[in-house]
Image: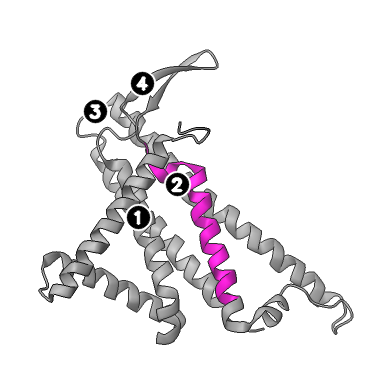
Amino acid sequence: MIGNFPITNSLLVTLLISGIIIIVALILKKILKAGVPGKLQNLVEMVFEGLLDLVDSVTGDREQTRKFFPLVATIFIFVILINWVEIIPGLGTIGTEQVHHGEKILAPFLRSAAADLNVTLVIALVAVLASQIMGIAVLGLKKYAGKFLVSPFKKPYFVGTFVGILEIISEFAKIISFSFRLFGNIFAGEVLLTVMLMLVPLIVPLPFLFLEIFVGFVQALVFAMLTLVFMKMATEAH
């Protein structure tokens, strides 16, 4: 606790990963200034070129790609790291025993950030709010609001108003589906790995570790691509 602000085990992992991303970015910036490409730079360029081509395939417009890419790439990198961190030995399995509702439970010192609903909810809020801001920036406030606020006296009568209400509901549904999809998959994987490590600590958990690496990649890709699709849809007129 810092004052009244609780410091959770997932928050510590989130801050650690954020710090790693910032440090790597600063190192790459320094390398780029030096003009001497190394293995790290080549690897990063390969990843970013692949992501750039992927975003291009959705937008079909390089100018839009440049607008969307920073957020989409950041979400992909951050989500894949908070997903993969769960396979680190000891994460989620080393901690202290605490009594909760009369039962002893393990309180790990560190746990996967994606296994905390608060973290996935914040990422979902950022993704959805960013799509709204991008839509307003491209279309203008009046035109963008026209997607949701339609006069009931405009032909076909009341249909546009009803569709607008559904659009508003869908924006909130995006936040819920985003956050719970990522949280559910990673939390289930963390529980599975913990149980397998407790029961059979050697060899048997290895296939599940590789499975979690694959699931972590897929979830990060899905999260980033859905963010991209929502931003693309937000910037399109009726």
- Residue at image mark 4: 96
Closest to the observer, 128 or 173: 128
Identify residue type, mark 3: Pro
Residue 201, numbered circle? 3
Residue depicted at 26% across the width and 42% down the height = 207
Tell me, yes or no, if residue 189 can be seen here: no
Task: Name the residue: 33% across, 78% down.
Answer: 53
Magenta span contains residue 49: no
Comes first in the chain, label 3 or label 4? 4
Q: How many C-alpha atoms fall within 10 Å of the one at disc 1: few (<14), some, or many (≥20)?
A: many
In front: mark 1 or mark 2?
Answer: 1
Rendered position, 114 above or below 66: above
Residue type beneath disc 2: Asn
Identify which residue, 129 or 35, lies in the foreground.
Answer: 35
Q: Mainly helix, strand or loop, the magenta region?
A: helix
Residue under circle 1?
Answer: 80
* Tag 2 near tag 3, CB within 8 Å: no
Q: Secondary structure at mark 3?
A: loop
Q: Residue at x 38, y 46 (%)?
A: 14
Asked if the residues shown at circle 1 and circle 2 are in contact, with their CB atoms under 8 angstroms apart, the answer is: no
Q: Which mark is residue 185?
A: 2
Mark 3 vs 4: CB contact within 8 A? no
Closer to the camera: disc 3 or disc 4? 4
Q: Sequence order check: which comes first, mark 2 or mark 3?
A: 2
Q: Nearer the viewer, mark 4 or mark 2?
A: 4
